[in-house]
Image (cartoon, grey):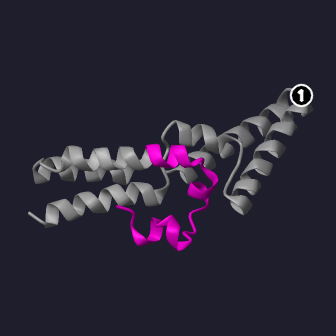
């Protein structure tokens, strides 16, 4: 079920999956398998619609980047207009983002993974399995 790029037994470079507790990775993997099974007997149009949804799905990197940017800009604006103490917020957020870039982990990551936010590789695994289903018919 795992693609070569996502196969953790081959030393995958996916730092987010390595930084995620195994039970959460398994839960996400099971959901991917369940999604594939749900579409296995559907027609091409329904599968194509799901593939388009997957193309629009935000991966964990995008969610982290947008949230970090939003919080940093908010803290900067509040620091410049309300109280300089708000400048701590963008410093903390950028520190978390730096930590994520270096280690693949940051404090919001466990929450996002618990909510089911997937990596691009996980999204693509479902997408390519659905494409494979369509091509086999």
Position of 41 compared to 52: left or right?
left
The magenta region covers 1-27
Q: Residue at point 48% right, 40% down?
A: 116
In the rendered view, tell whether residue 13 sits above or below residue 95.
Answer: below
In the rendered view, tell whether residue 49 sits above or below residue 3.
Answer: above
- Quarter holding the N terminus? bottom left
79 vs 89, nearest the viewer? 89
Q: Residue at point 75% right, 48% down?
A: 96
SS of the residue at dot 1? loop
Residues packed near mark 1 inside 10 Å, few (<14), some (14 to 19) or many (20 plus): few
Magenta-colored segment: predominant secondary structure: helix
Q: Is residue 58 magenta?
A: no
130 vs 77, nearest the viewer? 130
In the rendered view, tell whether residue 114 sits above or below residue 43.
Answer: above
8 vs 16, nearest the viewer? 8
Residue 75: percent from the left, percent from the top? Answer: 78, 36
Kindly identify which residue carries mark 1.
83
Residue 46: percent from the left, percent from the top? Answer: 16, 46
The number of callouts visible is 1
Position of 132 compared to 137: left or right?
right
Q: Residue at point 83% right, 45% down?
A: 91
């Amino acid at each position: 079920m795992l693609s070569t790029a996502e196969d953790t037994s081959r030393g995958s470079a996916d730092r987010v999956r390595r930084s995620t507790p195994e039970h959460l990775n398994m839960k996400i993997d099971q959901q991917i398998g369940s999604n594939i099974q749900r579409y296995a007997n559907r027609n091409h149009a329904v599968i194509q619609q799901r593939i388009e949804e997957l193309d629009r799905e935000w991966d964990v990197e995008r969610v982290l980047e947008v949230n970090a940017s939003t919080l940093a800009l908010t803290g900067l604006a509040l620091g410049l207009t309300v109280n300089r103490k708000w400048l701590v917020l963008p410093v903390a957020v950028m520190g978390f983002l730096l930590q994520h870039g270096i280690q693949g982990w940051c404090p919001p990551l466990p929450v996002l993974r618990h909510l089911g936010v997937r990596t691009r590789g996980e999204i693509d695994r479902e997408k390519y399995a659905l494409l494979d289903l369509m091509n086999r018919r």
